[in-house]
Each structure stands twice: as C-alpha cells, then as structure tokens.
Image (spheres, coloured by chain):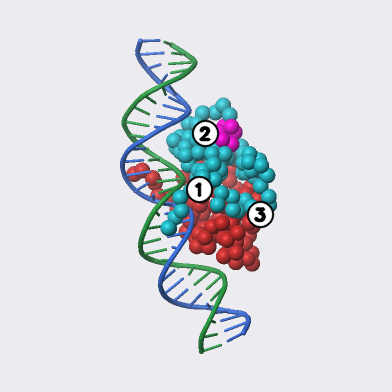
Chain colours: A red, B cyan, C blue, D green
Amino acid sequence: MVRVPLTLSERERGERLGLALRSARAGRSIVDVATRAGISPETLRKIERGRIPTPAFFTVVAVADVLGLSLDDLLSGLAADTGRIPDGEMATLGR
Amino acid sequence: MVRVPLTLSERERGERLGLALRSARAGRSIVDVATRAGISPETLRKIERGRIPTPAFFTVVAVADVLGLSLDDLLSGLAADTGRIPDGEMATLGR
DNA sequence: CATGACAGTGATACTAATACCGGTGCCAGA
DNA sequence: TCTGGCACCGGTATTAGTATCACTGTCATG
C-alpha cells in the first residue's frame, strides 16, 4: 500500500471547504468564477461539491482570490463548522 | 490534451513556496516538522526543494500550521519575491 | 573508527487532481 | 415552442501528489 486512499474525515473536510467556497461565490456563476481563477468549470464544480476533497494549494488560492476571500478566514470558517480545533491539532486533522 | 503538464512558471512558483517554507522552518529538522504536520519527511523535502510544485491545499495548511505561519503572509511573501502582483492577477499566475 | 541521525536522491506503486467530452435537466427569454 | 446558458453527472485520459523503500553522503558524538 503506497498511497493511502483519502479517509472519510478528509472527504468531509473537503465537503466543508467546498461549501465555504460555494457560499462565498454567492450569486456569481461557476463558469465566471472558474474562468477568472484560471481553472475549468468542472473542476470548480467538483471542488464545491466535495468530489475533489484535497485540491491543489494554488487552485484554492486562485479561487479564494477571485472571491475576495482571505485564506486564513476561509480556514477558520472551516474549523468553526465542526467545533473548535485546538492549537496544534490542525496538523493531524483527518488522520 | 487532457491534463496539461505544469508550466515553467508554475514550477518556479512551487520553488518559491518551498523556499518560503524552508526559511520558516529555520532550525527545526524536516523529520520533526513533517511528523507534526502528519506527512512523510520525503514529501516535505520534495515540497521545499520544489519537486512538488503544486502540493495539496491541506498539506500546505498543515505545514504552515506547524511552522506558525499565516497563509496570507506566506502568499504575500511569495508575491514579493517576483515583484508586485496586481489585484486580480493572482488567478492567472503561471498560465 | 563506528554509530546514529538527518538530508538528499531515485525508483516504484498507487491514488488523486484536472481537463475534455457527451449527455441530462432546468429555466428564462426570443 | 425553441434556444441558449448554466448546473450536474459519468466516463476517459493524462499528469501530479504522496508514501515506502533502498540507497549515499555528511556530520556530530560515542
């Protein structure tokens, strides 16, 4: 077993990320945001629906940039969804 | 053409990310930081050396968390390395 | 000198991310 | 009604990320 498949927690974490991005997108269309972010609409759709649970770093950066989101705010929003994550435990989240 | 290979700019961007993480690691060992971040030392090593130019979002998050880095600061540091990136152009960086 | 820890490399194996395509369904406007 | 745009899905093809392993080299310490 060389690369372990994503765990359930990791997939759920991806879902929360997707929900956060989707709500930040507000009224704008997927096509519009994806194009501005330089990714394909399918990819953004999959991220928002949680079907890409661990997107590439710069993909998330680009989308957050288009949406005017701070990454730190985005992350703290994710943590808030499942209750408080104590300091130092973000590292092992989902493992 | 289904998935385009990474461009030179994207690889260079990955190198800058790696350098930023490496300098933030300061004196700590790769093994120590990687273990706390929940990833393998080889993976962190590859990220720092730019051999993984677009790591997974949560991988970077975990490492930055261990290093006490703000993601927003990390990113603005990357931008500063190659001069100012105007608002709204982060999205198309490296394309 | 021997040993152990760490950095680094390259190969291998496997899963995941991403893009493109074809199809479906919904809905607003001509 | 027809048409166009958007959302969504499933399949396909390709590259990338990640872990494990087996090495080498360096350096400090016994």
| Label 3 or label 1, whichever comes before in sequence order | 1
Numbered disc 1: what chain? B
Q: Nearer the viewer, mark 3 or mark 1?
A: 1
Point 58% across, 29% down: residue: B26
Callout 3: residue from which chain?
B
Instruction: Look at 54% across and 41% down and name the residue there.
Output: B12
Residue A11 visible in rendering: no
Discs 2/3, front: 3
* Mark 2 chain: B
Task: Estimate the x, y position of residue A34 in percent, counting from the top left.
Answer: 57, 60
Q: Between disc 2 and disc 1, whose residue precedes?
A: 1
Residue under pointer 3: B88
Q: Residue at x 66, y 42 (%)?
A: B83
* Span colored in magenta: B19-25
Do the residues at discs 3 and 1 belong to one chain? yes
**Disc 3 to disc 1, C-alpha distance:** 20 Å
Q: Amino acid at mark 2?
A: Val
Q: Gap between marks 2 and 1, in whole Å?
A: 29 Å
Place of residue B94 in the rendered image (x, y in percent of width and height, measured from the top left): 56, 49
Dominant secondary structure, magenta? helix
Q: Kindly identify which residue carries mark 1.
A: B7
Residue B45: which numbered mark, if any? none
Question: Where residue B1 appears, x then y in whole percent?
Answer: 42, 58
Within the image, what quadrant is residue A28 found in? Answer: bottom right
The three-letter amino acid code for the residue at tag 1 is Thr
Q: Position of residue B76 (x, y in %)?
A: 65, 43
Q: Quadrant of residue A27?
A: bottom right
Helix, strand, or loop for circle 1?
loop
Q: Residues within 10 Å of mark 2 (few under 14, many from 20)?
A: many
The residue tagged 2 is B33
